Amino acid sequence: MTDTSESQPVSASATYAAAGVSIEAGDEAVEKLKPWAEKAIRPEVMGGIGGFAGLFKLKLDRWKEPILASSTDGVGTKIAVAQALDIHDTVGIDLVAMVVDDLVVCGAEPLFMQDYIAVGKVIPDRVAALVKGISEGCVLAGCALLGGETAEHPGLMADGAYDLSGTGVGVVEADQLLGPDKVRPGDVLIAMASSGLHSNGYSLARHVLLEIGRMPLEGHVEEFGRTLGEEMLEPTRIYAKDCLALCAETEVRTFAHVTGGGLAANLARVIPHGLHADLDRGTWTPKPVFSLIAQRGRVERVEMERTFNMGVGMVAVVAPEDVDRALAVLTARHVPAWVLGDVRPAEDADAPRAVLLGDHPRF
């Protein structure tokens, strides 16, 4: 056998850093994000950031028969806009909104969030900016940021790339659980305005505005009164506290969080078999960003309405006698709201459970 040991070059020992993962950068990121994470707190939180698990002490004397609710979501391709503009402290708000506003649909109070941030390379200031947004979103929702994970994926993701996801946990009393079974004929639908595109439909929005329309993100758009990038990065409105306030003061049957699939499809999820919801387009005018996408991309109305929220981010289904009170509560909380439609018995069991009727004014 030929001895080749002297002919083979001796390489330096492999390291995690050489493979693209920096433990030191990860530690620095944790130190930078701690002040933000510590702002999103509740009395039930035990311990601090940095442990292997987040601890949250349920005060069971507060509830008679508590039901835990859980939701997981992400931000989608809105992240591509944040990365293109190098603005990273708003998409965390979007992440919280997508999670906690799913929780509150069943009447659950959001208790805590945990996030997962996947990055190609840990850039401490960027990770801290992302957590800053998540923290601000948790404060708006009234929940704690109980921790999370930042994972470095060299070779799988580009250095500047990242993605976000999060899980939230909430609680609701068993006798206060909301849902389709509570909905009755004659109930009224109250729309709550969205802040803009929120976090759905960005693949189509980017395709139309940036690729077909060749509009620069930094360019000022007269209809918006600001740049295209600022409009597209407008954070998703968080409705959790507003919905809980409605539950406390009115007879709410259920909510519908308007995300992927659009207004009618999401509302149909909370309308029970045998009932039907008519939604009147004439009760509101979508924001200019929706008409711009429709015009620039020649997007048909049916496609717009199944892709975007079209200006409605949350719908409350309330008892008819509580409509005025519900509108007053939302007005006092500075949430634009209006009567969107009502619920009636279905004439055809096979018909869609929610339908948009009429036309938007000036759209």
Image (spheres, rainbow, N blue to C red):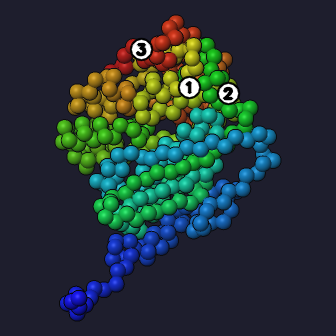
The residue pinned by badge 3 equals 357
User: Looking at the image, which residue is at 50% across and 51% down?
Assistant: 166
Real-space Cα distance between discs 3 and 1?
19 Å
State which mark lies toward you, 3 or 1. 1
The residue pinned by badge 1 equals 270
Frontmost residue, 311 versus 95? 95
Query: Which mark is first along the chain, 1 or 3?
Result: 1
Where residue 85 sits, quadrant-wise, is bottom left
User: Looking at the image, which residue is at 68% across and 62% down?
Assistant: 46
State which mark lies toward you, 2 or 1. 1
Q: Are marks 3 and 1 in contact (CB under 8 Å)?
A: no
Mark 1: give few (<14), some (14-19) or many (20+) Cα within 10 Å: many
Please state which amino acid type lies under the numbered disc 3.
Leu
* Helix, strand or loop at mark 2: loop
In this image, 91 relative to 115: left or right?
left
Quick one: quadrant of the N terminus?
Answer: bottom left
Mark 3: give few (<14), some (14-19) or many (20+) Cα within 10 Å: few
Residue 73 seen: yes
The residue pinned by badge 2 equals 250
Real-space Cα distance between discs 2 and 1?
18 Å
Query: Which mark is first along the chain, 3 or 2?
Result: 2
* Helix, strand or loop at mark 1: loop
Residue 160 in the image: state x and y as whole percent: 31, 61
Instruction: Say if 6 sits above or below 249 in the image.
Output: below
